[in-house]
Amino acid sequence: MIRKPGSDAVLIIVPAYNEEGAVGDVVREIQGVMPGVPVLVIDDCSVDGTAAVARAAGAHVLSVPHHLGLGGCVQAGYKLAFELGYQYVIRLDGDGQHDPRYIPDILEALRTSGCQMVIGSRYVRRDGKATSVARGIGIWFFRLILRPILGATVYDPTSGYVGVNRQALEVFSRSFPLEYPEIEALVVLQRRAFRFREVPCVMRPRQAGRSTITPIRSVYYIIHVLLGVLVNILKFERRRWRR
Amino acid sequence: MDGFLNIVSILSVVLFVSVMHSLRQAHIRVEHSVSWLAAAVALFILSIAPGALTAIAARIGLEEGPLTIVFLAFVVFLIVLYRFSRVISDLKDANIALAQKVAILEFHLRTWHEEQESTQGR
């Protein structure tokens, strides 16, 4: 049962939108790696059988009433986890790209490093890449942009394979970037002097379904994220200046 | 110029009547109608008072009276659009928060039902 977690409790959340072909296997793989740990699939109002498949595989399902987009969907999971008292939350995508075998590594890093966020990174080791050339260039670009802002290199800033502790959970349950959350979330945490680190993992090709990323959306993504980063910096600096 | 001003007069009356009709039908809320009604009244006054239009044109450095009307209308529309963008953004944020709240409440309800069923089944 997902209620009444202990003081060291972990919740695995899996945002999914039209992922009936992959989400069942993702849930079963997670249960194989982390037996007894609750898995929460957040169904972003899919039009296919994502929720039913996830439930049949043994996951709890949080169904949002209309399509919120990735950030809104993930934040719903963070809000529920915070409300229920979980100490650690690990997020994997529902398309099967994130191999659940790395969950113990992320969890161990969260528990022992004192970092508020741990990122599963395909670039810490050279064998972890499973991405297109265009996305690789995008990741390189954001790595350069973020380095002076974050004060450290984040090798895989667009990775959605992340673990957070309760401190980050509290921040994200109140304020979380809604459309393309990964990079902005790093800035949100850094501005609060929270720490993060990367652990190596291998990304797989998506197991089923189609990616929603098109060339036009990629350009929009870059502009949106740059603007979001800038706004987060300005917002935080203004608050600090007011104090 | 007279023909243009007549068209502006007619358009401002049409705008005013349309907004009032929408208000009556409750398609626009009162707080969102004020900008449009003010714009319609301002356009109407300027179109029937060429003297005022010429004075404003001279003040802002435009030679043509009709161009001044187009310019003022453009400014008004920009302000209204900006205001509505803010309203839409606020509504979207509120909508997302509400949807998340509904989802979480449904989740609790479902969990509670499952617990009840399993208790009764024992």
Image (tube, rainbow, N blue to C red):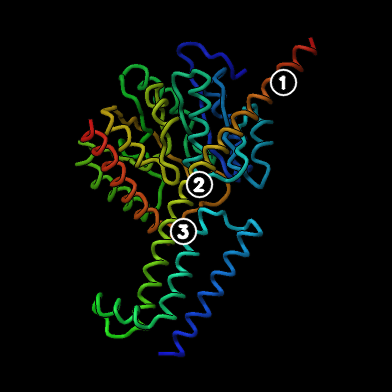
**Label 1: element kind:** helix
Disc marking residue A85 = none
Residues at marks 1 and 2, CA–CA distance in whole angstroms: 33 Å
In the picture, measured across the screen, residue B16 lies left or right of residue B111, that is: left
Q: Dot 1, how many residues are within 10 Å of its Cα: few (below 14), some (14-19), or many (20+)?
A: few
Q: Quadrant of residue B122?
A: top right
Spot occupied by residue B28 in the image (x, y as percentages of width and height): 58, 57
Q: Which residue is labeled 1 in the image?
A: B114
Give the amino acid at mark 2: Lys
**Label 3: element kind:** loop
Image: A117 above or below B22: above
Q: Quadrant of residue A219?
A: bottom left
**Chain at tag 1:** B
Q: Which residue is labeled 2 in the image?
A: B92
Spot occupied by residue B120 in the image (x, y as percentages of width and height): 79, 12
Give the amino acid at mark 3: Thr
